[in-house]
Amino acid sequence: MTKARQEHQKHQARAVVIGAGYAGLASAILLAQDGYAVRVVEKLAQPGGRAESISEQGFRWDTGPSWYLMPEAYEHFFRLCGTDIANECELVELSPAYRVFSGTERSCDVHAGVDNVAELFENIEPGAGAKIRAYLAQATQVYQLALETFLYTTFSSIAPLLRLKILSRVHWLVAGISRSIEHKTNRIVAHPLLRQILQYPAVFLSSQPAQTPALYALMSHTDLVEGPRYPQGGFAAISAALWRIAQENGVEFSFNTEVTAIETVHKQVRGVRSIRGELFDADLVVHAGDIRHCELELLQPEQRSYPERYWQRAHPGVSAVIIMLGVRGELPQLVHHNLLFSPDWEPDFHAIYTGAHPERPDRISESLYVCKPSHTDPTVAPAGHENLFILVPAPAEECYGHGSAFGGQESEWVSHVVRNTIARLAHWANIPDLAQRIVVQKTIGPADYAQRYHSWSAGAIGRAHTPRQSAFLRGKNVSAKVDGLYYAGASTVPGVGVPLCLISAENVLKRIHGDSSSRPFSY
């Protein structure tokens, strides 16, 4: 470091970001562009957070996100960074958007676009084509309204909510919050498979259809109207791009460094303390991880905006068992994204969120998601092989144990889930020799989320989007007790998912500058 740079940094405000996941990387970039001297302190050995990458025998798996939706959020953020997402990674439109299996009864391909979806719905349920057109038109309107009003905001002022465009749609919003997505979609279509196609996004909101506000029907715009894309190289490619951009903006990184305390002086942040006793001085701290861990483990009791009693009433959402397989030979039965729905998925949700069910005594969901990235990306598997990533929704309870991916001992329950799931996939997708063709197998269990990422109650995605944990009820992204402490990531506003984590970083900067608007920053 040059002497001039050292002198300059003496007069710069210092910011420490805890966590190098998407929210942490994005926060670091925006703070650096805003003039801060930024250091990111990360527990793991590499950036990306839950979006890790594991390689073995020529296979490479993303361990976290796999659905590239809400392209506007990515495009906007990378433009803020002075580049374009298309310059950072190759995006491939997926056709079909995904394949749906309903037990062994039937499978169908879902192609994005209103006309395609209407044709599919009409073929399965006569009369549903016109209904889904109206449903998707409203979903698109609500999605655009959310982008303009409910996502890029800290909810620190009601002024943005008093615009005529919002007031004229109050009836939409009241119904959207007070009713569930299950209630809304059950009035649109009657066929169980069509209902599942409209309701499954609730799981990716860490919730369930009966508890997810109908407002989130907007998700159908993202998967059925716009359709998913795939970044070649996986989500690890996006993490790598953000890391490079952060470094180009002067952000410094301390990996393999776990934070054990946020230090304060007279209620003002002073820095963060590492497990090795290092103190990283800071005038401002952004915790870009699980808020509950920050509040209860890094702060003193009198400094907690969200004490233990708050979390006793909150909902941690869903955990998962992740099964990563390297398979010999091709698997034409599967496309890039595959959703396997139990014909009756109510016992699945009961097992995940409530407890054992007579039809699910081991609390194993029969509904699952399978990604075959080798369908699109030849770099993720050796020639003549396939790469599978299987997500099985699971109870958010650490007691169900670890998987094998990070060197731990796979629990008996996780092993049971794996055997059960591989057998079900083989049966439903008509791949009778699937188990015999597996050459590599790695797993992640609920306890891995709790211990590796400090995730509350072993949640895999983030706090559930229930009525009490959505929009302005999700909590503030700033501490009420410690000046200079801010929050970013999936457990604060606006919510779960990579696009919303990027938006949460922008909302931190808005909070710092007292910007109560509801629109994204201009470039």
Image: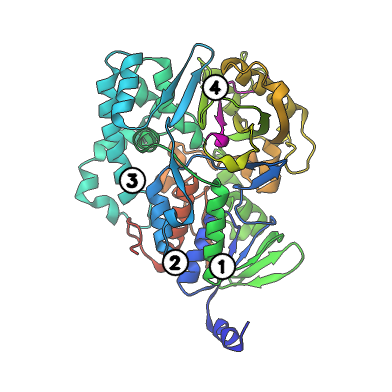
Q: Which mark is residue 247?
A: 1
Q: Mark 3 or 1, which is nearer the eye?
A: 1
- The answer to which of marks 4 and 2 sits earlier in the sequence is 4
Q: CA distance from mark 4 to mark 1?
A: 43 Å
Q: How many marks?
A: 4
- Residue to which mark 3 is pinned: 146
Q: CA distance from mark 3 to mark 1?
A: 32 Å
- The answer to which of marks 4 and 3 sits earlier in the sequence is 3
The amino acid pointed to by label 2 is: Ile
Q: Which mark is residue 275?
A: none
Q: Which mark is residue 512?
A: 2
Residue 154 visible, this angle: no
Of all residues, the one furthest to the right in this rendering is 409
Q: Residue at x 38, y 66 (%)?
A: 514
The residue segment tinted magenta is 362-375
Residue 248 shown in magenta: no
- The answer to which of marks 4 and 1 sits earlier in the sequence is 1
